[in-house]
Structures are given as structure tokens and as C-alpha cells.
Amino acid sequence: MREAREEYATRLAQHRSAAAAFDRTDRVVATTRLLVAAMVVLVAWWAFGADTISPWWLLVPIGAFVGLVFHHDRVLARRDAGARVIAFHERGLARLADEWAGTGASGERFLDDQHLYARDLDLFGRGSLFELLSAARTSIGERTLASWLLAPARPDEVGRRQACVEELRPFVQLREDLAALGDGTADRIDADHLGRWAGSPPHLTSRGARLVALLLALAAIATAVGWWKLGWGYWPFFITLVIESVFARACREAVERVTAELHDASKDLSRLAGILARLEREPFTTPPVVELQRQLHASGEPASHAIARLGRLVTMLDSKDNEMFMPFASALLWTTQIAFAVEAWRARTGPAVPRWLTVVGEFEALLSLAGYSFEHPDDPFPAVEPEGSRFEGDEIGHPLLPAREVVRNTVRLGGADPQAILVSGSNMSGKSTLLRTVGINAVLALAGAPVRARALTISPLAIGATLRIEDSLQAGRSRFFAEISRLREIVDLTAGPRPVLFLLDEIFHGTNSHDRRIGAEAVIRSLIDRRAIGLVTTHDLALTESTRAAGAAVANMHFEDQFVGETMTFDYRLRPGVVEKSNALALMRAVGLDV
């Protein structure tokens, strides 16, 4: 972390210094523009009021003013990019200081309450794993990262992602450059809409109609020149305009559809082109990263050039709304011409766009994991075995907890170790946190990311959890019914191709101890018989006795609490065996209940 902190702090200082210089330049240029504007007025008075100089002298201050406008725009653009980079490094330092919650994209739109572990393991929302990881600037990048967290990858795919993250980890400059193109939660590029639009069939496909539009525009120019310079009169030009009007009316429906769809799909094309261009020119060496980059050139031209070309067409289309250009645009069939050009672009280039965007999404997801790896160099990549039911985590900790507060425990399931661990312990002793720690590290491991552990060996697993089961007034469903429904889904998951990792918190605590014991014993036995591995927490000490019939397949472990004076303390250390005391009455008395 020291290396990352020093890197971010050094770069942050440099960019803050550059930002101060841009602020000074902004003030100087703005003041100069005012002075030059005053000079324009003064020269105009000398030329037209006092009639002391030629009006041609106006070109000098006007030219200077126009030049200053363009220069000022560049200064402001660079200042804004610098501000985004400053925010990027500030967020990096905030993550290293464990003060990042609420500063990034929460990814809540990916949260599905029916998912078997997304809510239970805090994958999305404020202070979530997604917020910690995500550096995506496009909607497809966010969706790609979310999909990796929601669906464990195959072992070979995990290995490929690990190799990519390994190469991308030191590329701080690349991540910084991409942040300069837009990195606020409001700046996400809606690449999904662009991909759907580009991949759909064009509406204007007639080459003949496009040629007619071009010839009519040329005829309008020729007849206008003939009227102005050659004495043809206005009739040829007027007749041409009438023919253009008829032609434009015939094409109107298709043209309006093209322009409407393009307007929705073309947001931030220049920024997307910038992202593509930056990815295209990076000298990668690892084969899977090089292959990703190669796909950005697969259509015969760089993806950034094609997207930039579409962006120029959009700019040309928008120019029709300029009051000075509007009369000329009408005579040139400008909107129709650009609509045909856009559709030609879509017919030729559109099929490649969804793949380009997929590559961008994958790059953004990989760079998000690489940034996490750079900031947490002590977090290793897990060893992923191709088959079996194993989770062997040595000194695993929860990545969402502040580093100074994390207590690490060793959890080993499957293979020569028990298939299940029944965790007992008092309230607030760390049972639920242990389940979340195991689950979230399994998610990271099978997404291709480093894990918060000294070492982790894991096999391909499907995950199911019951940590945040809630009742639903709208659905008329009790908490107990919601729990047994989720357990049914987890048991059904064992019929799939992957062994299951189950994380069951306070199993059946919504029913009486007799039914809880019988039901829990049956569910655990059923999961074990189906090759599943996992953890079950309980307050019911009777349940710990019922697992003896399972033999070595189930182990009992526990957390303890201690009273120092009248203060209850926890060390959050997992110990073998069954807890021997409860703190429930002590907690009741601590909050003032007379028990």
C-alpha cells in the first residue's frame, strides 16, 4: 500500500500544481479576451465612426479574438481533465485510507433481490464490493464487472483474467489517462444504447436515393451561382428547391427515424473515441491482453477512428440548427445527406461496434481489478483447481472492512477437511462476518481478482447464502418462508454442474427449537450428500449436538466474548469446538432491560 500511496500522492501534487497554473492561464486569457473585444469596438469606431482607418483593420482584432476563444476552450478542457485526474487520485488515497464508501458508483441497478448471494455479500450499494472495485466510465464496463461478480467464471477464464490483471496492475498512467476522459458517476457513457443502435439494420439503404440527394444539392449550388453571377434568373433555383422539397418529404419518415435514433445513441462519442484511442496505442505484451487490443483493429481501421468519424457526422448534423447556416442547410438537403452518410457508416461499420464495446467493457473491468491489485499488493491471486469441492483459505479477511480492523481467520472446507462447519457463538461475536468473508473472497477469486488472504485454494463453486433474508409485506411473505424458499433454491443449485458453497446464517431461527433442529439437520445432511461445502451459524447449542451423526463431514467451531469489568469485548477469533456460554442476557442488561 505504501507504494500506491506514494504514487498517488506524488501524482496528485503534480496535477494540483498544474491545475493552479491552468486557473492562472484561464484568468489571463479571459481578461485578454475582454481587452481584445474592447479593441474590436474601438477599431470599428475608428473605421466606421471616425472614418480614420480602413475597415480591413477589423480583421486583426477579430482574428485575435477568435484565436483566443479556441485557445480558451482548450485551456478549459485541459483544466477540466486535470480536475478529473485530481479526483481520481483523491479517491485512490481515500480507498487506501478506508474512507471510500459513498464516493463511487454503487452499482445498485445490478442488484437483484432474487440472486442467491448478491445482497447477502454486499456486492452492490453504498460501501459495496462494486463501489470499491469499479473504475468503469461506460455502462458496458460497469455491466461487465457486475456480471463477473454475479456469475463465477470457469477456471481457465479465471486464469486468463488473472494474467491480464497481472500485466495491467502497474499501468497507473493508463488508468489516469482514462480518468481524464471522464470518471464521475454522472459521466458514464451509455455504450449499451450505441451498441444496440449500431448493430441494428439501417433504414436508408438505397444508393440511388443517396445519389439523387447529392445531385439535387449540387443542382441547388449551381442554380444559385447561375442566378447570382450568370443572369439565369431565380426560376431554375426555385424549381430545384421545389424538387428538393418533394424528395425530402418522400424521405422524411426514414430520415427522422435515423436522426432520432442517432441522437439517443451518440452521447459522448468523442469521449468513447478517446478511450478507444488510448487502449489502442498501449504497448501490451501478455497474449490475452494483446488479443483484446487486436480486436479493436479487426474491422480494417482502428475502432477509435470509426467512432470519431461517426462523431464528426453527428457534429455536422447538429450544425443545421445554427441560425446562420440553417438557410443553406435546407437548400443543400443537409439533414438528408447526413442521414444517408450515417446509415452508410452503420451498414459498413455498425456490425463491429458491439464487439468493440464488449472489448472496452472487458478492459474496464480488468483495469478495475488491476487498480484494486495495485492498491492491495499483499492480496494474492488464488489457486483455482479445475474440479472438486474445496475452499482452503489461510488467514482470510473481509476486503470491505478497514484494514486496521480486520481480524483474519483460517477456514478450510472440502478435500481432507470437513465439508461443513457449524459456527456457534454469542451475539456480535463475528459469525455473520465470517460467512461474508468466505463468500466475498470466493466471489473475488472466481471473478479473477486477488483475494484478502495469505493464501486461498478454491475449486469452481456455485454460491448460495441466507445472510440477508427478509420478510415482504407487499408479497405477503414471512421471513421464515423467505428463508426456506432460499434454502430450497440452494439445494436445487446442487443439481448443477458446480459444487455448491453454502453460507447459512442462523438457520431456521424463525421457528421453534424442535423444528429448527430437525430441519437444520436434514438440510445440512442433504447438502453434504450432494457434495456441497459451507458454513452454518447458530445460537442453538442443541443443534451443535445433532451434527455428531455426520461424523468428520461436519466440524463445530465457535467465537467467544469476554467481559472486562462491565465491558463486553470480542477478539473475533475462530476456535474449534462449541461455544460454552451466551451473552444475550448480558446484552439485554447492558442496554437497560430489567432481566
Image (spheres, helix red, strand yellow):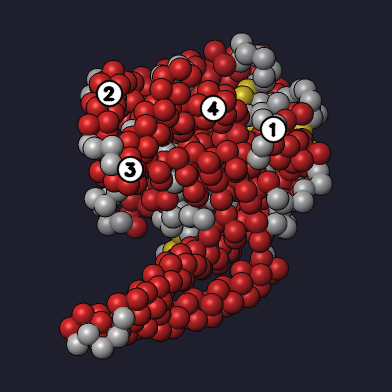
Q: Which residue is mark 3?
A: 230
Q: Which residue is mark 1?
A: 300
Q: Nearer the viewer, mark 2 or mark 1?
A: 2
Q: What residue is at 67 percent from the left and 14 percent from the top?
A: 497
Q: Quadrant of the N terminus?
A: bottom right
Residue sticking out furthest to the left: 49
* Amino acid under disc 1: Gly
**Residue 283 pos. (x, y %):** 77, 51
Q: What residue is at 33 percent from the left and 40 percent from the top?
A: 226
- The relative height of residue 90 versus residue 200 in the rendered view (above or below) is below
Q: What residue is at 48 percent from the left and 55 percent from the top?
A: 182
Q: Nearer the viewer, mark 4 or mark 3?
A: 3
**Residue 190 pos. (x, y %):** 44, 39
Apparent side of residue 13 relative to residue 101 in the rendered image (left or right): right
Residue 24 in sight from this viewpoint: yes
As rendered, which of 561 and 371 lies closer to the eye? 371
What SS does tag 1 mark? loop
Q: Nearer the viewer, mark 4 or mark 2?
A: 2
Q: Are marks 4 and 2 in contact (CB under 8 Å)?
A: no
Which mark is first along the chain, 4 or 1? Answer: 1
CA distance separating discs 2 and 1: 39 Å
* Amino acid under disc 4: Gly
